[in-house]
Amino acid sequence: MSDAPLIEAVGLHTYYGASHVLHGIDLTLRRGETVALLGRNGMGKTTLLRSLLGLTPARRGEIRIEGIPMIGARADRIARAGIAYVPEGRGIFPTLSVRENMVLAARPGAWDLDRVLAVFPRLAQRLNHGGGQISGGEQQMLAIGRALVMNPKAILLDEITEGLAPLVAREIWSIISLIRQSGIAAIIVDRNLAQISGIAERLLIMVNGRLVLSGTPAELKTHSDLRRYLSL
Ligand SMILES: Nc1ncnc2c1ncn2[C@@H]1O[C@H](COP(=O)(O)OP(=O)(O)OP(=O)(O)O)[C@@H](O)[C@H]1O
Ligand SMILES: [Mg+2]
């Protein structure tokens, strides 16, 4: 089992009621690998992340984490298997303090509260503030910090630089590099093709619930369809 991919999805089909959104997704994430998931609005990127996490379960297909079948598994089991999520809109608890938000998520491992606070000194100054009282950029840092203290094998990041001031976004990108260097795998959804191309080993392009193109940033840079798929 130990050489199985970290996440392996085969033939995923996901629906919202009668609406068929994911049409047979095959995706592999190796240990420590950083993959970008790109596509225009409404193409199904968030739905794919949520399907991998068991939050919007796929109706058909297979998901294995380190070789163990996870289709039908509840989201908490997938989280315990080491897959963390930083959702669009951050998903932190606004009435709990910054410290409580992190302590509640923490699991033993290399990333403890002190290490996260060393990476995000702004959070260290806000530990006793409510999660809902801090700025948008700080909330985003808290959401990432909370994922890190879970000591996951992979983090799925959904548009986490969206709407942030450029300076804060830059800080978040440097944290994403740090996550990569620390050996945690990642699937990153982001609109910034230039930034993501500097970090991801592979790009996956999604159109209408299908992965239509994949390759290294260098391979796709000159691909004639890339800009059309992304409406650039
Ligand atoms: N809760 C829901 N109920 C019904 N339809 C939904 C729901 N969430 C998303 N959809 C639809 O599923 C499709 C894929 O949406 P999804 O949010 O996965 O796309 P996305 O690629 O993440 O888009 P964006 O770039 O805007 O975040 C869209 O047509 C969307 O309208
Ligand atoms: Mg989305």
Image (cartoon, rainbow, N blue to C red):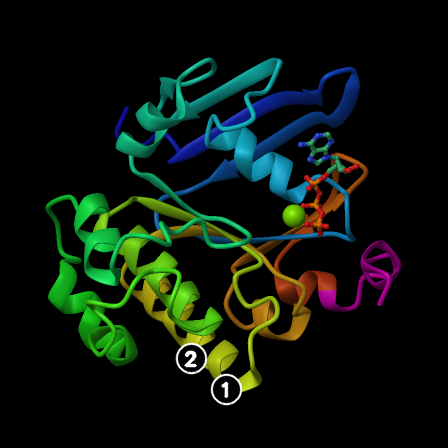
Q: Is residue 157 above or below residue 107?
A: below
Which kind of residue does numbered mark 2 sit on? Glu
Q: Is residue 99 above or below residue 45?
A: below
Q: Is mark 2 within 8 Å of ligand 2?
A: no
SS assignment at label 1: helix
Considering the image in quadrants, where does the C terminus appear? bottom right
Front in this rendered view, residue 232 or 122: 122
Q: Residue at x 41, y 65 (%)?
A: 139
* Residue 94 in the image, given as x and y percentages of width and height: 37, 54
Which kind of residue does numbered mark 1 sit on? Leu
Q: Residue at x 67, y 68 (%)?
A: 193
* Residue 140 in the image, given as x and y percentages of width and height: 43, 64
Q: From the image, tell me which residue sits under label 1.
A: 167
Total numbered badges shown on the rendered structure = 2
Looking at the rendering, the stretch of residues picked out in magenta corresponds to 221-232
Q: For the residue carrying disc 2, how many other residues have a C-alpha within 10 Å: few (<14), some (14-19), or many (20+)?
A: some
In the picture as drawn, the residue positioned furthest to the bottom comes out as 167
Quarter of the image for residue 171 reads: bottom left
Left or right position of 188 against 101: right
Label at residue 171: 2
Left or right position of 125 against 38: left
* Residue 31 in the image, given as x and y percentages of width and height: 35, 44
* Residue 112 in the image, given as x and y percentages of width and height: 13, 58
Label at residue 155: none
Front in this rendered view, residue 30 or 56: 56
Labels 1 and 2 touching (C-beta < 8 A): yes
Q: Residue at x 70, y 21 (%)?
A: 15
Front in this rendered view, residue 193 or 108: 108
Q: Is residue 108 above or below residue 162?
A: above
